[in-house]
Amino acid sequence: MTWFWGAILFWLAALAFNIRTARRHGGERWAQMLIPALFGVTVLVLWEGMVRGLDVPSVILPAPSAIWDRITLSLPTLWEDFRQTILKGALSGYVIGCGAAILTAILVDRFPFLQRGLLPVGNFVAALPIVGIAPILVMWFGFDWQSKAAVVVVMVFFPVLVNTVAGLAATDRMQRDQMATWSASYGQSLLKLRLPAAMPFIFNGLKIATTLALIGAIVAEFFGSPIRGMGFRISTSVGQLALDMVWAEIAVAALAGSAFYGLVALIEKSVTFWHPSQRGRG
Amino acid sequence: MRSILPILTVLCAILVIWYGAAMKLNAAWTYDQAARAGTDPTFVDVINDTMAQERPVLPPPHQVAKGLWEGLTAQAITSKRSLVWHGWVTLSATLLGFAVGAGLGTALAIGIVHNRAMDLSVMPWAIASQTVPILAIAPMVIVVLASLGITGIVPKAIISAYLSFFPVLVGMVKGLRSPDGMQLDLLRTYNASTAATLWKLRLPSSMPYLFASLKVAIAASLVGTIVGELPAGATAGLGARLLSGSYYGQTVQIWSALFAAAGLAAALVVIVTLVERLVLRRMGVAR
């Protein structure tokens, strides 16, 4: 019971500290980092305390320390799964899908007729449960990472397409007229005005697509995969009730997802440094 | 209305590409069969055969339409082969999860807007959680709850609630903060209580944000339910239909389940949009 009450006590202390700090130093930068960090630590402590104090069996909820042990013990397995799912499946699919979507958007942009037709369809498709095509693509492309990449391509294509088309329309009349008075060719005005102006929109699509890519790659593995990969490990470990392994994979997926998103956000920051949402920060 | 023609053109183009791809992909099987039978099929024979295989690599649109139509109407709606029944199983879990997720998201957003400590501690995590492939935990939730003796609609609804929770939370925090200083000051001069400010200013002005995030949330919660139906021998629902189709190579079944799911998603989004239009018009903010 010590664990249980200790966790509760820690929670109350952290809560009091957070409330006090938020009230006194809420506007300061260190407080804005410390408070969420302390909140995260509190959740972990409460979790550990509850699991130990209430003797929750590990087939229902393993303690964070047990998950950490599992992570450190099975690093090679995790790395192998990470390589199979994220590096091979998600990343290659992401690059192909986003590249294809941006190229399609540029093509579509030349023909207003196509644009008026494709945009509503694209918007509609972006709202559909596209993960459902996973079983079909696994049938077509086999069990290895190629089928996962194909699922990712289809999943990221429409959000990026819709955002890029919207971005290419983001320049106003005056700016386009300016390019025309300089007698800029289509290619010049695309490269020097419209693509740069579209960058904030494109990166918005690219950021949405990072999460979709990971989801696509992991869920596609539920439909069949070689004996490695994060989705495969999750579904088989669930079957063996080895929940610490499942949580370890989820921790890796969460870390990879945040890192991937952060990487795209960093690139965005250096590409769209001129945009109001990026200026005056940091 | 002037975009009807372009949309129809794009849809026709998709159909044409689909038929072409179906012929090309299914032809291999036809030639294979013909070689085994020792016959030499003419081009027309091949085309006819690719349009009507039992387990085509890519079923042509009319086969999918037929499968969908048979699934929807040919059986009694209580039959296990009826897509209406599977669709209802999925829909009920989606709606339950969506209601719970949207309700909790709104409640937490109200808390975050009124409490600085909560804002600072929860908000960064809520935003960070958007970058995490949450769906990966779906199989675990199902199995763990099953081992606790909870099966049926609740585990799926939990996954779908979890997925619809974050878009609503993030959207509502933005929406509840959307009244500007002038409006808030006006209410302060009226000596309005926090509750009255919430009820008469913050909630009404958050409506456009709420509906924008509800549209994202309902699509996400349908995906959540379908993925929740994949693992561990689920027998009912569109996700289970997809999985059993992929086990037995019944491509027509997969495609009809897929289109049923797409139709369901479209219908749900359209309903939310209609409600949005109605509410916003009543409130006088219609575009």
Image (cartoon, coloured by chain):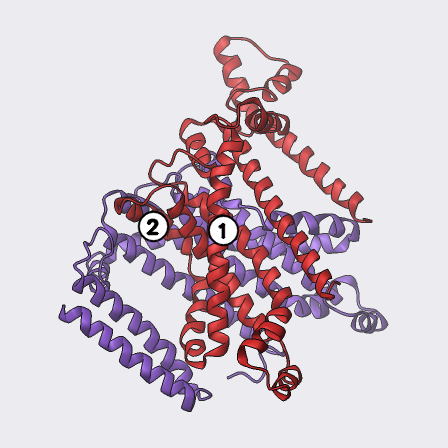
Q: Which residue is mark 1?
A: B221
Q: Secondary structure at mark 1?
A: helix
Chain A shade in the render:
purple
Q: Which chain is red?
A: B
For residue B94, side relative to residue A63 (left or right): right
- Where is residue A44 drawn, in percent x and y? 27, 68
Residue at 36% across, 50% down: A84
Does residue A111 appear in the picture of this structure? yes
User: The disc labelled 1 sits on which kind of residue?
Assistant: Ser
2 or 1: tag closer to the N-terminus:
2
Callout 1: chain:
B
Q: Secondary structure at mark 2?
A: helix
Q: Identify the image quadrant of the C terminus of chain B.
A: bottom right
Label 1 Cα crowd, 10 Å radius (few <14 / some 14-19 / many 20+)? many
Q: Residue furthest bottom?
A: A24
Camera-side residue of A161 and B178: B178
- Where is residue B50 drawn, in percent x and y? 59, 21
The number of callouts visible is: 2
Label 2 Cα crowd, 10 Å radius (few <14 / some 14-19 / many 20+)? some
Callout 2: chain:
B
> Is A219 drawn above or below residue A42 in the view shown?
above
Q: Residue furthest top?
A: B38
User: The disc labelled 2 sits on which kind of residue?
Assistant: Val
For residue B60, side relative to residue A232 (left or right): right
Q: Which residue is mark 2?
A: B141
Residue A45 is drawn in which quadrant?
Answer: bottom left
For residue B209, side relative to residue A225 (left or right): right
Q: Residue furthest left?
A: A2
- Where is residue B143 drawn, in percent x and y? 30, 45
